[in-house]
Image (spheres, grey):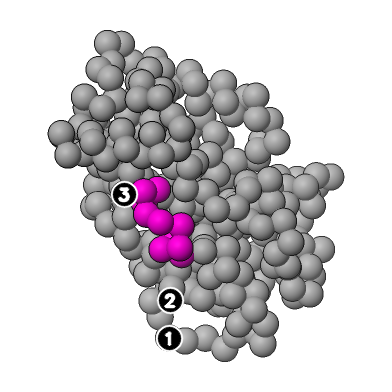
Amino acid sequence: MRTRQFVLPLMLLLAACRQEQQPVHETAETYPAVWEITDEAGALEGWLFGTVHALPEDLDWKSDLFDGIEERADLLVVEVSGLDDRTQLETQFQKLATDAPSLAPLAQRLEPAQRARLLELLEQNGMAPASLDGMETWAAALALAQLGRIHPAEFGADKVLLGDFASREVFELEGAGPQLAIFDGLPEEEQVDLLLSVIEEVGRPKKERPDLAAIWSKGDLEKLEEITGEGMLADPELREVLLVNRNRTWAAQIENLLTAAPRPLIAVGAGHLLGPDGVPALLEARGYTVRRFQ
């Protein structure tokens, strides 16, 4: 997940399954990827779209094809629906971030060399050495991750889609509280690994950080898959908890929606649609055909 605008809307997480190349609509080189989901009889059941949670305001990422899908979709499915309620989101974050008793200062939770890198990063960004001491390690990692953001969250694809579906039905796969609880439930060792991944990523010069918005908007699935296999998702334990387990849960929820509901547009963090552990692959294992067509 490499501390980017990928896995969770509250922090920083597209690709098809590893399968034969499918014919793609002519806009694939200039627009984000879109997949259609069909059942065993070939009937259209819905669409999958991988989002990036922070984008430039002037990025034109909607094609005519995608506009048509929005018009046809009966339901929007997202990870978190209440992205406009910042107060509620911040309240949930603070509650979980500070409820552990007897926390050692953040720097003391790291080895000496790691501690020096953390303090250097805080100083570079005008933050006091003790500014994150009251937070659990995972929460400090998410707070630091914001320093690596290149684009504003106000124009993230999921937030735009929620506005487009303001008068229609929206289904929430997780919600902010359960998402944060995943981090809160990590063992301290994994929380430290998360923090170290964030320190490494945010500490890189900006010119060395790939612009996910640009890669995503061109539908470059190969590059996106390469990026999302680095950083914290290169850690097997973190990958299992933050990505794979959630994808399995979502695939079951989505199957129920496809069976019972009108045609949904399913828009989740782009990293969740990658590779053999991605939602498209899991849906195919359940008998659906998932075909990229933009």
The segment highlighted magenta reads: 201-210
Image quadrant where residue 188 sits: top left
Image quadrant where residue 23 sits: bottom right
- Between marks 1 and 3 in the image, the one whose residue lies nearer the viewer: 3
Which residue matches tag 1?
20
Q: Mark 2 or mark 3: name the one nearer the start of the chain.
A: 3
Image quadrant where residue 190 sits: top left
The amino acid sitting under disc 2 is Glu
The amino acid sitting under disc 3 is Glu
Using the numbered discs, state the Cα–Cα distance from disc 2 to disc 1 in whole angstroms: 14 Å
Relative horizontal placement of residue 238, taking residue 275 as reference (left or right)? left
> What residue is shown at x 48% (from left), y 18% (from top)?
95
Which residue matches tag 3?
200
Q: Is residue 15 visible?
A: yes
> What residue is shown at x 36% (from left), y 39% (from top)?
121
Relative horizontal placement of residue 166, taking residue 278 as reference (left or right)? right
SS label for mark 3:
helix
Relative horizontal placement of residue 110, taking residue 197 as reference (left or right)? left
